[in-house]
Amino acid sequence: MFRPLCIIPARGGSKGLPGKHLLDLGGKPVIHWTALAASESEYLDAIVVSSDSEDILRRTMYDNIVSHHRTSQMATDESPVEVTLRSVLEYIELHAECIYDPVVWLQADCPIRLPGLIDWMLDMYKHTRNITFDSVVTVKSPIDPPEWLQERTDSGVLSPLFPSLDVPFRRQDTKEYFQLDGSIMVISREQLLKKNTPKLHGFLGRMIPQIQVFPYTISIDTEWDYKIAKLAKLEGY
């Protein structure tokens, strides 16, 4: 079965940059660009914006988008996003009387996506399900390799975070590392509904990476992120 459901979670509260989802970006609220990217997909069967904020839901009332009112208990800083994704999936399936698979999670604060990438990743998911994986996710390279990281000890001095690793002096000699960038995550329904996944991002299971580069890796969490995103929009991204 292949009936993709897109979920865009967007909390009204944000401590890093208050009201970030509704900040103006290129003449539209930040969340508009994520909703637009989803709307341009030829594969997505349904698109849901889930929020505890009436303003966010009102500003994303497009013809092809379903609004999901999230409870305040599910919209705190401590609320795991996978709980919201499962809740929305179960709610939509109940009302639509059908099963959705896979689930496409788009973070609302990632306003710049490569055109067509959502469908490209869905196509990859659809045609490679015989391979052992649970999700296809966008990733970016960290600014610095983990071998270079230091931590401050109880005595106040710095010590290598990973002392057992051989530390290369040149960046080109380091291993290839990645981190999730939050832009697009295509998750199998079966994997998302598993509830015993305690490790970080465990609910994503075995991931296939789609490597991205700047500015498609921008995620707005601070004022500087917002300024960079505005510059990228001015450049036509």
Image (spheres, helix red, strand yellow):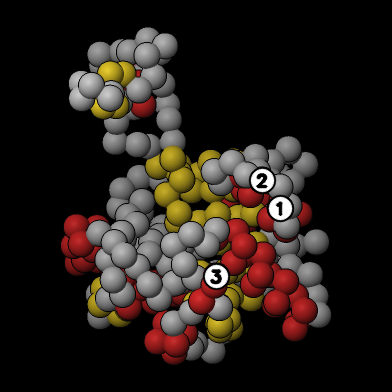
In terms of sequence position, does the residue under pointer 2 or pointer 3 come before the other?
3
Question: Label 1 vs label 2: CA separation?
Answer: 6 Å
- Residue found 81% across the figure and 80% down from its top: 97
Q: For mark 1, give the secondary structure.
A: loop
Q: Is residue 115 visible?
A: no
In the displayed structure, would residue 51 be above or below residue 206?
Answer: below
| Amino acid under disc 2 | Thr
- Residue found 58% across the figure and 75% down from its top: 47
Q: How many marks?
A: 3
For disc 1, the marked residue is 195
Front in this rendered view, residue 97 or 129: 97
| Amino acid under disc 3 | Met
Front in this rendered view, residue 66 or 91: 91
Quadrant occupied by the N terminus: bottom right
> In the image, is 162 to the left or to the right of 92?
left
In the displayed structure, would residue 85 be above or below residue 141?
Answer: below
In the displayed structure, would residue 112 be above or below residue 56?
Answer: above
For disc 2, the marked residue is 197
* Residues under numbered marks 3 and 1 in contact, where contact means CB atoms less than 8 Å apart: no
Q: For mark 3, give the secondary structure.
A: helix
Residue 112 position in % (x across, y down): 36, 62
Q: For mark 2, give the secondary structure.
A: loop
* Residues under numbered marks 1 and 2 in contact, where contact means CB atoms less than 8 Å apart: yes
| Amino acid under disc 1 | Lys
Mark 1: few/some/many CA within 10 Å (<14, 14-19, 20+)? few
For disc 3, the marked residue is 74
